[in-house]
Amino acid sequence: MRNTGLYLLLLTLCCACSREPLDGEFIDMSGYDVPCIEAVEVKHRVTEEECYGIFDVRTAEGKVIITKEFSDNLIHVIDPESGAVAATVLHLGRGPGEAVNSYYIGMSEDRSRFWAKDLALNQINIFDTRSVLQGSRQPLRTVRLNRYSGTEMDIMPVGDSIYTCSQLGGTVMRFNVYDSTGTYIRSFGTFPRLRGTAGLKDYARPSVFGGHAVYMEDCSRFAVANDCISLISIYSPEGTIISNAWGPEEVLPMYEVKEGGSTGTGGVSISGESVGWDEEQIPAYYCLRSYGGKLYALFGGTAGKEGSGSTVVVTDSNGIPQMYIRLDRTLIRFDIDPERGTIWGVDSDNTLRQYRI
Amino acid sequence: MKRLLLLGLALLVSAALNAQIVTSSAALDPETVITDLSEPEGSGTMLISVSIDYSDGTDSTMYFVGNSPEAAFKAAGVSVPQITNMTNITNEDYIRRMLVHFKDRFSKVSLWVSVSATE
């Protein structure tokens, strides 16, 4: 009888030790032996002053496209060879071709179009890259969304529709879809069955699973890489999860759901801030890009927390890791041009960095 | 490293503030000096306030109307590296109430660019 008790205790301990982060099948990146290469930082000619207030970076046509504050124009296109500003768009304001703010830059996989959302005016300005380089300052299209569905930072124009993924509350589904005029159609998509989230309040899910979304043009799939959890989820166009990829390092911090999903400070109320994270939080994924059927996900992990570097995790369209690209600095936003072997990034001091791979 | 972790949150809070600010406003005193940088006069669409914290503990706020924050920074004698925060506020009721004593002079203003800087 005493042995049986001991056996049960050992079994319980074993079960506890092998507890998986997700219910059901998932891809454990640590189980894959993939090549790891070191990217080498190279100098560029973009001035430090040009980069003050920088938020995001993309690259197209050999140029660098940045969003920034403290300037009359929110998007600058820079020639990295000379450091000269080749074009500026989105003058600050509320008129045609103007915006009040713009943070993340979305881009088509062929880099022929780029776009940015004005969160204040709730509208998306879509530009033709070549037209901008030829001097056009007006967007190809401006679409004003007819409702706020959480803080939608990542925008994915697909055909005649515009898909978004909320980073904070305001919706209880993973994605929102609008028609070409910006009229809300529906929300869809489930959240991953992460350990400990089965009873999570609906309004808290977008915050717990807040992350960065892309549309993978080659395979018509969506992917989301999480901010605070080392998880990349791949979705079908209908919003069902095709696969969950866990890693390359386990990041699963503690968090606390705040009642009501809103907080207030002074006379200002902010809705949607529904989750408080552990102060010892380790950053997981900072940014996600998709080119040619591959995902390029910027991972922080322990190195990111220590400020000693980050990793670009390259996966196939199912989330299976193909390669790791190590960077000796911690970047918080990035873009990659696999054909040119170039990575552009913004580091934690808001400095623009260039790497060769 | 704290700055790194806070960046994403600051960005989102800033975004939320821009989009959903709900607050009470106070009208600018009729004696407030507002420098009109717009051409022609009165055509500016932005109220740009530049608040400077000086190293001796004092501070001052300058107000401009125009279409170029960069021109306002220059007029205030502030260089871009001195800027610590910039918030763009679109609530037109708030802006109207703030400019109630200046509504004839600056009728086109629909955006308030609030800038903080240190010297």
Image (cartoon, rainbow, N blue to C red):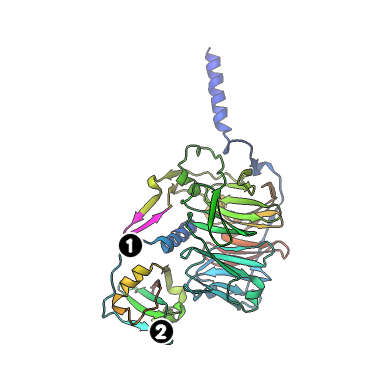
Mark 2 or 1, nearer chain start: 1
**Residue A302 is at least partly visible in this image:** no
Give, as a three-letter code, the residue at label 2: Leu
**What range of the chain is rendered magenta?**
A264-271
Residue density around tag 1, few if under 14, some if 14–19, many if 20 or more, within 10 Å? few
Tell whether B31 sits left or right of A73.
left
Q: Which sits in the foreground, A336 or A269?
A: A269
Relative image position of residue B38 (x, y in whole percent): 42, 84
Q: Which mark is residue B23?
A: 1
- Residue contact at pointers 2 and 1, CB within 8 angstroms: no
- Chain that bears disc 2: B
Residue density around tag 2, few if under 14, some if 14–19, many if 20 or more, within 10 Å? some
User: From the image, which quarter does the C terminus of chain A lie in?
Assistant: bottom right
Identify the secondary structure beneath mark 2.
loop
Identify the residue shown where x is 59% and y is 61%: A180
Give, as a three-letter code, the residue at label 1: Thr
Residue A218: which quarter of the image? bottom right
Looking at the image, residue A200 lies above or below residue A305: above
Answer whether residue A268 is magenta in the image.
Answer: yes
Relative image position of residue A288 (x, y in whole percent): 61, 56
Identify the residue shown where x is 57% and y is 76%: A88
Furthest-bottom residue in this view: B40
Relative image position of residue B117 (x, y in whole percent): 39, 72
- Chain that bears disc 1: B
Tell whether A277 sits left or right of A194.
left
Q: Which mark is residue B85?
A: none
Relative image position of residue A206 (x, y in whole percent): 50, 49
Q: Which sits in the foreground, A261 or A343?
A: A261
**Residue A247 is at least partly visible in this image:** yes
Identify the residue shown where x is 57% and y is 33%: A19
Q: Which residue is mark 2?
A: B37
